[in-house]
Amino acid sequence: MGTMSAEDRQAYLAKPHVGVMAIESPGRGPLAVPIWYAYEPGGDVTILTHPESMKAKLLDDAGRFSLCVQTETLPYKYVMVEGPVIERRSCDVEADARPMAHRYLGQDMGDDYIGSGEDSSSVVYVMRPERWYSVDYGIE
């Protein structure tokens, strides 16, 4: 088992995995839920959610979250990143929601998804990665 280089872990995180984000939830265990995200090497992590969701309420209170992405086939690997929310803003469908839908669904299905109005009232949270943990069991 080996730890990924900074370049390898950033390249891995940049792929369209479904992540699991974890957010502090006072008085109980953290909220851990699957989520789409966007990331480019060297940049910040962006997620979209509805402003009335439990995720949004906890993010507003905690001001930070963790995101873990993994490979579910051999050789196993994962990247976990954690950091503060540095921006919260209204979602722009063309700048935020459509590219995210295309990332995960492809152009045609992504456009259908956006056409359904699913993300029309979403908010965008941007997290600045501070801590990274990664393992690649394919590295000797």
Image (spheres, rainbow, N blue to C red):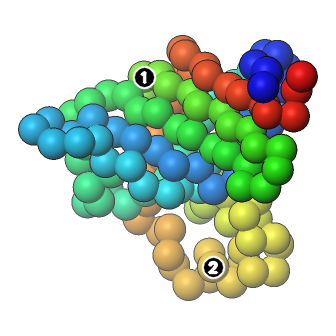
Kind of residue sitting beneath label 2: Tyr
In the rendered view, tell whether residue 5 sits above or below residue 43.
Answer: above
Choose between 14 and 85: the one closer to the eye: 14
Choose between 103 and 6: the one closer to the eye: 6
Mark 1 lies on a secondary structure that is strand
Q: Residue at x 61, y 20 (%)?
A: 132
Residue 58 coordinates in the image, percent (x, y): 25, 43
Q: Is 22 situated left or right of 63 in this image? A: right
Residue 84 coordinates in the image, percent (x, y): 42, 22
Identify the residue position indicated by label 1 in the image: 84
In the rendered view, tell whether residue 19 sits above or below residue 82.
Answer: below
Residue 114 coordinates in the image, percent (x, y): 62, 75
- From the viewer's perspective, is the residue at label 2 or at label 1 nearer? 1
Quadrant (top left/top right/bottom left/bottom right) for the C terminus: top right
Q: Residues within 10 Å of mark 1 (few under 14, many from 20)?
A: some
> Looking at the image, can residue 58 be seen?
yes
Identify the residue position indicated by label 2 in the image: 113
Q: Residue at x 54, y 15 (%)?
A: 130
Q: Residue at x 29, y 59 (%)?
A: 53
In the rendered view, tell whether residue 67 sits above or below residue 31.
Answer: above
Residues at circles 2 and 1 in contact by the CB criterion of under 8 Å:
no
- Compare marks 2 and 1 and give the one earlier in the sequence: 1
Kind of residue sitting beneath label 1: Pro
Quadrant (top left/top right/bottom left/bottom right) for the N terminus: top right
Number of the label disc, if any, that sits on residue 5: none
- CA gap between label 2 and label 1 equals 29 Å
> Looking at the image, can residue 15 be seen?
no
Q: Residues within 10 Å of mark 2 (few under 14, many from 20)?
A: some
Q: Is 105 situated left or right of 81 in this image? A: right
Q: Is 89 situated left or right of 29 in this image? A: right
Q: Quadrant of residue 92?
A: bottom right
